[in-house]
Image (cartoon, rainbow, N blue to C red):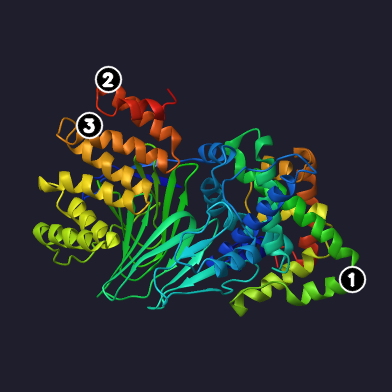
């Protein structure tokens, strides 16, 4: 009799669903962060816990207040706020909306009703918002995107030079700059992650990690579905290059970057993709997106290590890594340059990057 | 959990499995990787919640105990001697927290009545009756006997792990499980 009861009890359902699972994780992280913050106070002078690089976890009021303050055309000071959004148009609304009990994250609501939930230390720019394209840049932190399904427009999130493309889905992008890691976790729908050289398609429950320091892609899933994304006709390389030239002439750098990025990604075997990578690096740098610029320059010299643009691309990559604050990468790139081109035209700049 | 390495070229992908075990996860957490902690929680959170739910007999304190378990774990992970044994270690923390809650509950009889009325939360009425009956019987068993019995007989844990979770010797835990069994058989009617 007791055995039967024990079996019944062991088989009884546990009231622990995904919502509860995530809610408790949010509470755990908020508790740990508040303890870390308390421990970091000068009066105590001690540190404990995991030493994570996330900023502003659980600091809901501060994050929400910061969000209200950043609806201006210029980028906010990154170090001062936990979460920030820079919107190029007036039709993007930002509001602190409670999503789950106990932890309230600020939300960015786009005109098509897609929502970006700005979590730990999130910084997001809305680069483009058109009927056929929504393009966001995630500079740091964790953001959960809930994208309204619409096959007539592309929804693209760019983080550290990696593109995440979706049609309609819920997914989270985590960019941990200090640890040089990018994570994409899909809850619903299909997502395509493209680092310019490789593409991974993720389905519900899939999780992908990109180690930005060694170009390693990791897909976390015990039984990953490999869905086939619907193919749509892509513009020709001639059209894309013409679009890029027109956009640059007009000073529309986001559109120029989007067109050049398409060239590099979708026409990698065309010889013109080589110079397009270099152009993309220059455009991204002009936009102040130095990590993306460095990735584009690196892609250029890797494609043809002895090519006509290789020396310049190596130097520009090093310079861009430095501008992006990636000192380790900048030094490594500068050392590579000097090793390969000891009498190169950029040697003085590279030495200065090394502090020499 | 299995990790698949994607060594893909443009628009194609190739997967090969790589094992990322608890030892690797713990090492990554200790290096300050927040995602590793989330992975650790993702891997063991549900299991710990199941153990706590069955120990407590209801979900009134379930979230709090799971939360406290992982907060303590995060803060004390460096003290874990064998990272491969992280799950039993988490259960040990959860058991102690659950025990503390039980003690508090027992001191307050009105809350105890509330627990009996509320326990357990299950979706199917056909499941509810035997679970209610068992919890009514378990409620009359002291915590020091009840906890090892649930861990061993319901959770199916190894006796060594039960002893560690209850912070007692193997011999003692065997004796307590036997005592709990005798009391439960008496109340529920052994062999009936």
* Relative to B60, residue A281 above or below: above
- Image quarter (top left, top right, bottom left or bottom right) of the C terminus of chain A: top left
Q: Are marks 2 and 3 on the same chain?
A: yes
Q: Which residue is mark 3?
A: A311
Report x, y in % for residue B182.
79, 56
**Left or right position of A121 against A227:** right
The answer to whether one can see residue B148 in this image is no
Residue at numbered disc 2:
A342
Tell me which corner region of the image, top left, top right, bottom left or bottom right, holds residue A25.
Answer: bottom right
Residue underneath mark 1:
B109
Q: Chain of mark 2?
A: A
Q: CA distance from mark 2 to mark 3?
A: 11 Å
**How far across and down, in percent of the image, does residue B136 sit?**
78, 70
- The secondary element bearing badge 3 is classed as helix
Is the residue at mark 2 from the same chain as the one at mark 1? no
Question: Contact (CB < 8 A) between labels 2 and 1?
Answer: no
Give the spatial CA distance, label 3 vs label 1.
79 Å
Numbered disc 1: what chain? B
Q: Position of residue A211 (x, y in %)?
A: 40, 42
């Amino acid at each position: 009799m007791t055995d039967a009861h024990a079996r019944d009890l062991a088989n009884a359902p546990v009231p622990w669903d995904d919502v509860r699972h995530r809610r408790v994780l949010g509470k755990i992280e908020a508790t740990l962060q508040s303890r870390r913050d308390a421990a970091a106070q000068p009066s105590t002078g001690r540190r404990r816990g995991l030493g994570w690089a996330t900023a502003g976890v659980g600091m809901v009021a501060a994050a929400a207040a910061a969000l209200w303050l950043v609806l201006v055309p210029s980028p906010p000071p990154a170090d001062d706020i936990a979460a920030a959004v820079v919107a190029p148009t007036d039709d993007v609304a930002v509001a602190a909306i409670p999503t789950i009990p106990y932890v309230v994250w600020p939300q960015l609501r786009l005109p098509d009703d897609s929502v970006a939930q700005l979590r730990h230390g999130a910084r997001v720019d809305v680069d483009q918002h058109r009927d056929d394209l929504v393009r966001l840049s995630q500079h740091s932190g964790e953001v959960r995107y809930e994208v309204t399904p619409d096959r007539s427009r592309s929804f693209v999130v760019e983080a550290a030079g990696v593109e995440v493309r979706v049609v309609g889905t819920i997914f989270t992008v985590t960019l941990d700059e200090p640890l040089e890691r990018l994570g994409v976790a899909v809850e619903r729908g299909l997502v395509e992650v493209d680092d310019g050289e490789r593409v991974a398609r993720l389905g519900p429950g899939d999780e992908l990690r990109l180690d930005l320091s060694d170009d390693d892609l990791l897909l976390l899933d015990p039984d990953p579905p490999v869905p086939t994304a619907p193919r749509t006709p892509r513009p020709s390389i001639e059209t894309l290059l013409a679009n890029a030239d027109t956009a640059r002439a007009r000073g529309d750098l986001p559109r120029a970057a989007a067109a050049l990025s398409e060239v590099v990604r979708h026409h990698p075997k065309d010889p013109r993709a080589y110079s397009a990578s270099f152009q993309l690096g220059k455009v991204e740098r002009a936009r102040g997106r130095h990590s993306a610029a460095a990735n584009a320059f690196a892609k250029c010299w890797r494609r043809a290590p002895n090519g006509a643009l290789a020396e310049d691309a190596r130097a520009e990559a090093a310079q861009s890594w430095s501008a992006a604050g990636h000192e380790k990468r900048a030094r490594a790139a500068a050392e590579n340059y000097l090793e390969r081109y000891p009498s190169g035209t950029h040697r003085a700049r590279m030495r200065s990057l090394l502090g020499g | 959990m299995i990790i698949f390495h994607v060594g893909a070229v443009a628009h194609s992908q190739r997967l090969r499995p790589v094992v990322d075990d608890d030892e690797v996860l713990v090492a990554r957490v200790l290096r300050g990787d927040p995602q590793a902690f989330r992975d650790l929680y993702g891997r063991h959170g549900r299991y710990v919640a199941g153990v706590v739910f069955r120990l407590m007999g209801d979900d009134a304190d379930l979230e709090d105990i799971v939360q406290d378990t992982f907060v303590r774990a995060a803060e004390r992970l460096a003290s874990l001697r064998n990272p491969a044994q992280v799950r039993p270690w988490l259960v040990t923390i959860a058991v102690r927290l659950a025990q503390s809650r039980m003690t508090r509950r027992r001191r307050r009889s009105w809350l105890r009545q509330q627990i009996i009325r509320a326990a357990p939360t299950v979706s199917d009425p056909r499941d509810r009756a035997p679970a209610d009956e068992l919890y009514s019987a378990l409620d009359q068993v002291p915590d020091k006997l009840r906890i090892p019995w649930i861990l061993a007989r319901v959770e199916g844990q190894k006796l060594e792990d039960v002893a560690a979770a209850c912070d007692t010797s193997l011999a003692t835990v065997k004796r307590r499980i036997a005592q709990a069994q005798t009391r439960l058989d008496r109340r529920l009617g052994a062999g009936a």
